Image (tube, rainbow, N blue to C red):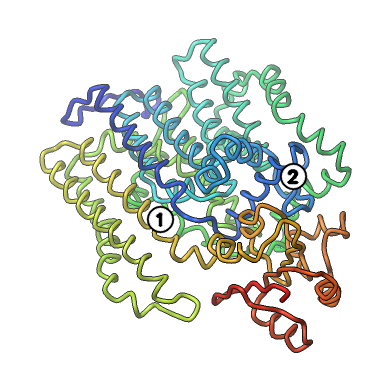
Amino acid sequence: MSSFSRYDHYSGVAVSRSVELAGWLLFALVWFGSLGYRGLIHADEGRYATLSLFMLQSGDWITPRLNGFLYFEKPILQYWMGAISFAAFGVNEFAARFWPGLTGFLSVAMTAVAARRLWGAEAGRYAALACGSMAWMISNSHFLSLDMGVSFFLTVALCGFLLAQQDDATAAETRGWMWVTWAAMAGAVLSKGLIGLLIPGATLVLYSLCNWQWAFWKRMHWISGLILFFALAAPWFVLVSQRNPDFAHFFFIREHFERFLTDEHKRTGAPWYFAPYLLLGLLPWTTLLPRLLTEGWRDRGDGLRVGRLLLIWSVFVFAFFSKSSSKLPSYILPLFPALALLLAHSLARIEPAALKKHILAPLALWLAALAVYPFVDRFASAETPLAVLHPFARFIAAGAACFVLCALLAWRQLNRRQTLPAVAALALGSLLAVTLAASGHDSYGKLKGSKEIVAQIQPYLTPDMPVYSVRYYDQTFPFYLGRPVTLVDFVDEFEFGEKQEPQRWLPQLSQFVARWQAEPRAMAMLGDDTYRELERQGLPMKVVYQDPRRMVVVKP
């Protein structure tokens, strides 16, 4: 039997169903309540909101378009969910972030369900508290990108497999949970491509090689599982390929193999690139990481070694993306729910005195953030003025104060040998601290989004006025305008779409000059250098908005 067997530990406090339900309701209120507070920012949030909004407007649910251009860098599921969210909640920031918020919440719930079924009710509570309080889980669930969605489906696939392969699972339970696993892998593929198969598959191969266990391969329900997988994942790929013959090569070759093997996307980084994100993202549980690694690897037994499998999953995700030539901080997100399961098993057994030592590091970090608050003026610059820094710093300080108070409460509970209330206090402190700090980013985010710009230029806009984006593109601009803009001398991720439909953009600045002079009325967003170049050419322009990063002009 595995050392990660079922074990109910007494935490020093009884938890009724009503108290547990109240905890989940409080968690949901904080989790979802802050989704719509901030304006969308460039680049990811604007990109994926725009893709979903224009899909809803066009009614084309097969071929995604970014600012009017064919856009095949990622699969379709995120755009579908975003469009459905806009239809349900209206066009706003809450709706734009609802899918990552929902999938983050469900990831926490899934880890709780898995831990409860594997190790008992107490472990399920610890899993929820650990996963829902990790800084990286909170942050990415409140930011619009693809990574929380794919992480959710990978988490379901991982948990489904663990539950299907339990020693005491019945044949019906094994079949049912394996179907959940196959369906979740289909969701992961529809969310971000082939990593939906690669990460689970590579983990199982490595696990079998490390432990020389192969029996579970016979319990995968291959035929029915593959039928389910392809029934869910294949139809969109077939339809989009039929309508767009160049899709398959662009998506599978360029966006998978070339992205991993080359630095074409200019997202390179050192081999240790993800280390800071792992250590900070795991807060407030970072100092428990060595304990998790040790306990996970020591898991031995005749059946499935859950601890080792979770550890191999985590290490593979970290190593795979570290090796990739295309890196973004959120890529390692799928390893955090696996670490939360390891944490659940560990926290259910840790002595209160030992846990007290692990409060000190996160407490010191948040105290440091609090101590920096009086000196925030020193960080001001031309691009980040005091008017931006002050509100941001106030939110961070408020979040730091919340964590400090909760950490002191946790310390008191541990003195009473009440581990679960202490972990709950730490989790609440982390949730409040990270949520407040993220909300405070809105003051800085206004410099990276177009919400206020569109509000200020609204008096100059008319429904038939052409709007240009000249050598500059803010991903949030079309979203807040509610319509595409015409790109001028700007390529970046639009290269494929611009080649397919060259009539939709202006490759040369001279073409824009001629178009501007011919239009009775027009508007353009551009940078300061481009404005001065056009000004020297005598182009008639009136500045109606300007900030340290860009400006908007109209034809007078």
Quadrant hosting residue 208:
top right
Q: Residue at x 46, y 57 (%)?
A: 277
> In what element is the residue under mark 2?
loop
Mark 2, residue position = 64
* Above or below, comparing residue 445 to residue 170 in the picture: below
* Above or below, comparing residue 41 to residue 111 in the picture: below
Q: Which mark is residue 439?
A: 1
- Left or right of 426 in this view: 389: right
* Horizontal and vertical percent position of residue 129: 33, 38
453 or 501, which is in the foreground? 453
- Left or right of 480 in this view: 32: left
* Above or below, comparing residue 101 to residue 543 in the picture: above
For residue 365, say whether it is visible: yes
25 or 312, which is in the foreground? 25
* Horizontal and vertical percent position of residue 274: 51, 58
Q: Looking at the rendering, in which quadrant would you find the C terminus?
A: bottom right
218 or 399, which is in the foreground? 399
Q: Which mark is residue 507?
A: none
Q: How many marks?
A: 2
Q: Residue at x 57, y 75 (%)?
A: 546
**In the orientation shown, which residue stands out farthest toward the left?**
416
Amino acid on which the number 2 mark rests in the picture: Pro
Q: How crowded is the residue under tag 1: few (<14 C-alpha within 10 Å), some, or many (20+)?
A: many
Q: Residue at x 65, y 39 (%)?
A: 198
* Horizontal and vertical percent position of residue 298: 39, 37
Amino acid on which the number 1 mark rests in the picture: Ser
- Left or right of 318 in this view: 399: left
* Horizontal and vertical percent position of residue 21: 30, 27
For residue 316, say whether it is visible: no
Quadrant hosting residue 428:
top left
Q: Residue at x 58, y 57 (%)?
A: 328
